[in-house]
Image (spheres, grey):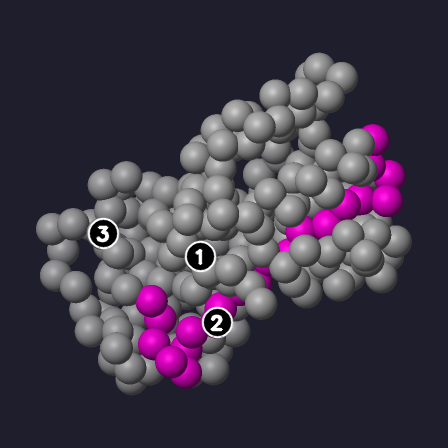
Amino acid sequence: MNDGTLKLFSVLAIRAPFTDIENAWRQHHTEHALAIDWSPTSIIEKNISDGARADAVIVTAEAMDRLIAQGVVAAESRVELVDSPLGLAMLPEAVAPDISTVPALTQALLAAKSVCYSLGGASGIYFQTLLNKLGIEEEVNARATTIAEGFTAAQLLTGKADLAVQQISELLMVKGIRMIGPLPPGAQKVLSFSGGVCNEAARPEAATTLLRFLRGPEAMPAFTAYGLTARD
């Protein structure tokens, strides 16, 4: 890394639009290349607890609360970034199940050969609670395909699963799959993401500039294209 490189820990959910965002950033900030460590929030928190450090961090809003309370992130640097809904995906040639209501979603999950979700990601952690709430945890998990982290839709391409659940922005990272749609009201959980500058940042001013850039007009259209919406 060069002397001006900014180190960022970020959730996987916003990786898809980041190619366009990073290209726009480079046009205006050639002095600050980005080195990004993409991981689920739970892994980012663990790495920080183990001593890993960055200039800025983007995690779930709940995790940001914890990082500020722990003194890792400067409270005044917090920036609310985007909201991200959860969805289901399948292969393009498959017949899409009805998931427009909670009962329909329940039947679709029970009828699936195997549903893939991520054990380490915020979406997968929530999905486990949803299965319990719906009373189908045992039946679905008996055939589920779980991954520690990464993109669940990749398991559709290998034939290990016929449904994949994750944040829509993450599902769209995998080419060759088809979105069924968002989870219905009553089952949906919109995950919210916040950014902040670390108290031990080597380049706090540049990190602040980056987070403001991510809320700006050059970055937000890229987020929107992947189903992410700006937070109030």
Eye-nearest disc, 3 or 1? 1
Residue 198 picture location, percent across and down:
80, 44
Q: Does the magenta stretch mainly form a helix, a strand or a loop?
A: loop
* 73 left or right, relative to 211: right
Give the distance between the C-alpha atoms of the residues marked 2 and 1, in whole angstroms.
13 Å
* 181 left or right, relative to 47: left
Q: Which residue: 82% across, 58% down?
A: 75
Asked whether disc 3 touches disc 1, contact meaning CB atoms under 8 Å apart, the reply is no
Q: Which residue is mark 1?
A: 228
Give the distance between the C-alpha atoms of the residues marked 3 and 1, in whole angstroms.
18 Å
Q: Nearer the viewer, residue 91 or 32?
A: 32
For badge 3, the amino acid type reads Arg
Eye-nearest disc, 2 or 1? 1
Q: Which residue is mark 3?
A: 178
Q: Which residue: 70% across, 59% down?
A: 63
Where, by quadrant of the figure, is residue 122 drawn? bottom right
Asked whether disc 3 touches disc 2, contact meaning CB atoms under 8 Å apart, the reply is no
Q: Which residue: 70% across, 29% down?
A: 6
Residue 182 visible within the image: yes
